[in-house]
Image: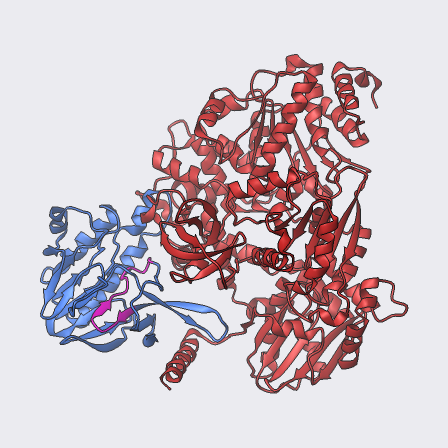
Amino acid sequence: MDSNWQQSDGYRIVRDWMAARGIAPFDFQEKTWERYAKGYSGMVVAPTGFGKTYSVFLAVLIDFMNRPDAYGNGLKLVWITPLRSLAKDLAKAMQEAIDSIGLDWTVEVRHGDTDVKTRQRQSKQMPDVLLLTPESLHLLLAQKGRTQFFKSLQCIAIDEWHELMGSKRGVMMELALAYLKAQYKALRIWGISATIGNLDEAMEVLLPVAGKKVKIVAKEKKKIAIEPLFPDKVEVLPWAGHLGGALVHKVIPVILQSKSSIIFTNTRSQCEMWYQLLLEAYPDFAGQIALHHSSIDAPIRQWIEEALSEGRLKAVIATSSLDLGVDFKPVDTVIQVGSAKGVARFMQRAGRSGHSPNEVSKIYFVPTHSLELVEVAALKDAVKHNAIERREPMVLSFDVLVQFLVTIALGGGFLPAAMQKIIRQTFAFSYMTEEEWQQCILLITVGGEIGKNYEDFHKVVQREDGMLVVEKRRIGMLHRMNIGVIVSDAMMRVKFISGGYIGMVEEYFLSKLKKGDKFILAGRVLELVTIKEMTALVRASSGRAITPSWLGGRLPLSANLSHFLRQNLAMSVQHPVRQKELAFLQPLLLTQQQYSHIPAEDEFLVERIHTREGFHLFMYPFEGRLVHEVMAALVAFRISRLYPVSFSMAMNDYGFELFSDTELQLSEEELQLVLSREHLMEDVINSINATEMASRKFRDIAVISGMVVQNMYGKQKSNKSLQASAGLIFKVLEEYEPNHILLKQAYTEVFNQQLEEPRLIAAFERINASTIVYRISTKFTPLSFPIKVDSLRQSLSSEDLEKRILKMQEQSLKQTRNKNK
Amino acid sequence: MIIKQQEVFFGTAQFILTNQRALYWEAQQMLVLSDLHLGKAAHFRKNGIGLPMQLSVDDLERLATLIFFFEVRTVLIVGDMIHAGANNEVALFREFIARFPDKKFVLVKGNHDRIADSFLSELGISAVTDELVIEDIHFIHHPTGHHSGRYTVSGHLHPGVGLRMPTKKIMHFPCFVLSEHQLILPAFAKFTGTDTRSMPRPALCYAFYEAGIFEVKLS
């Protein structure tokens, strides 16, 4: 390290300040400070709890104290966090540090919940440090005064970059950074990230332009201990399921002996159910436990978070809503119910306990069905090998680009040629063609390719000086309301008829309820009284009630984890068994072995099972639900080319099932053919309904690009005459403008995300290199049973509309006939 | 364009429902439709959402084909003729009406039709009313819940029916909804969504698609 630099005032002041608080800087922090002072941009990689914030934040303070003249008045540091809830506590900690160091800087937060008065004051006089979300940064760029805001800006720090990258919010950041960097050449950009599988790429996405940049990786590592909870007997665990209720009595002692616990579940409904289960099993928990998920009203969540950090709660049952965020100091135990489905997510959750750098984070794992114990063994291996998933950056997301261009047009305008250069510099749009760029410009100026003669289209107009600007107030207002890329289902607020909000539930769920029906939210039984203006009015009730099954939330198994899962399953029959989870499962594994087979690492298992219902074909690629969905459709399609047969399909993370009521004598040779790598993508395209999948993807695209005006709860419904569903717009564009750039994006997203082409190809290559083990059984096996009971069935339908309608008519006639009986 | 027909009896009237979003009343030589939402796409364009002009052109072409096919004398629009104020798509309608000097165009007003009557008559609409009674049939835009034994024909809801496929997937079709005293028309405009919830029950739905019309019972 540069000894001159270590003599500098700024460095000495900060070092002394830390020493006074009994801490010494880590190497990675010192390195960040020094590089920042030398004008570098960069990315800091460190585990949670090691003072990542201090690395970049103190770097700016040190540099300022050494060169105060280089810093002008106003905003100096913009700090981006992915979560609003993080911003408040972070701002408090930063302000405390600044005050006790003795500087006169102010730190403030600005996002959707910031009151108008504060926002107006900020627009006039910016604080020295401003904490923003990607959305609120874009909102600032949409303001006429934007050049004023950023004139003294020295640094933008992007916290939790790994969370943003891989989503469209990451693309939003890339665009904003490229734009700001082009206006303010000396701007330093620093990302802060946890470990992910593709760190170098993460850095390239953040800092795509050559220049002084550095990646700083902390040597420190977080220690994690994984402790599965076993039932007394293996028979207690069901073969299939997702609740895990059988182990409630094992969880209670863990909670009791801890100071404070977080219990992570995978879905909101599982979260609600576990809250009820714990209260039933241990009524004394009343008042000491709470539940936390994204459908609970924000003020209640805030109260829970505060209670948790003050140690007033014994346990909080949460979903991914608590994955990120400030440390809750009293929390010393984390319990994970059901598979976490990925290594990164599991480690992140584990890290929510044991905060100080050298403490061990301990996480208890509660299996919801027997085979999940194999997943624990796999997780342990993955953690040991540090096999953390990659985050794939999104590219060519034209919906985000279109939104961004309108944002910039709104906040003072841009010159197209100069802007094109800036956009091309981002990672996301480095491969954008000239034609694609022109299409984006056409989209915002005349409404699309065929819109050249729409004289009535008004969005962005070209001024005489060549600048593209938004002139109409109403367009600007609509646009500001829709900035952002997080598209949620239409939600309704749930409110007591006597006053007080409880939370939010999908409109879709409430629409199925009748007045007087009871449902569970935030751990309470509520009775629906009436629905008024996107608000459901309820009163407290008791007795049996339905738990809303919120859509989404079912994440597929990650590729990293599936690799270790296959490995562990294969090892489970070799003696001696190394892992205690596998040892515990021996009876079950023996049943599998006896009825069928346990595939070795170089084997691929196919089971044919004949039951009274019909004929089942099970295959086990262990590639996660999404990949299985595509594989099942493909295999069904290929078999139907050999025999005229129709299937219904079911799948879970381990394998998939094809079910038919007609007998299927598939020979081993035919099976080889069906699983061939040849013509893979060609057959995939023929086997799926790409239009339907694209139409689903278009939902988000339409909202982000501004083609669908979101009707937000709580907002006046003055936009009613502009309501149209994305599905409807998709149909219209397919018919009238099939080359629309956003339609093409929908199809591209289907191929990149839904079909996961690289993973699919890798899977087929692996299967082709394996020995296929084809077993015939008359009973369901431990592997097949969970798939059989999975409710998410779908079927291959290559019939045309006419035939489908005939079938449905017959069915509806059957129904009415049955009723008349 | 394929026109499929389905006869139904309603009060003393005999109607022909079609899969092209309108019904024909032969005794009156009257084509009845609702929720034309003229100028909807243009309204979207004005607000920065690019949708093709061709949408309204196609709706009007479909209307013209129906007028020729049934040798219609009167076209009755049961409300929501204009989506939101005058624009150049609405102007298309003026040209359209001018093509049929010997036909009468009658409008029963809907909630979207907040435009001045003088403007409507200038477009070529020969009669504008809030409610119309012909024989024992009442035409009114907004379906009323309690119908005191009157036979009413309404629009407004954009009714549709979701049919469950063997695969648990649901397909939606626009439809006519027929109950004892009420007939609800589908939206004539193609660029409209469907409402599958607020329908009277029990009822008989006549759902349709490009090439056909079929019956679905709602209990």
Say whether residue B177 is magenta. Answer: yes
Question: Who's blue, chain-wise?
Answer: B
Decide whether the magenta segment is chiefly helix, strand or loop.
Answer: loop
Residue A230 to residue A488: above or below:
below
Colour representing chain A: red
Say whether residue B202 is magenta. Answer: no
Locate residue A763, reporting x and y percent: 71, 64
Residue A57 to residue B30: above or below:
above
Locate residue A413, reporting x and y percent: 44, 30
Name the colour scheme.
by chain
Residue A79 to residue A779: above or below:
above
Question: What residue is shown at x 30% (from left), y 46% (from top)?
Answer: B43
In what quadrant of the picture does the C terminus of chain A appear?
bottom left
- The answer to which image quadrant residue A83 occupies is top right
Locate residue A184, reporting x and y percent: 58, 24
- The answer to which image quadrant residue B18 occupies is bottom left
Residue A147 to residue A343: above or below:
above
Q: Is residue A41 visible?
A: no
Q: Is residue A345 visible?
A: yes
Camera-side residue: A635 or A241? Answer: A241
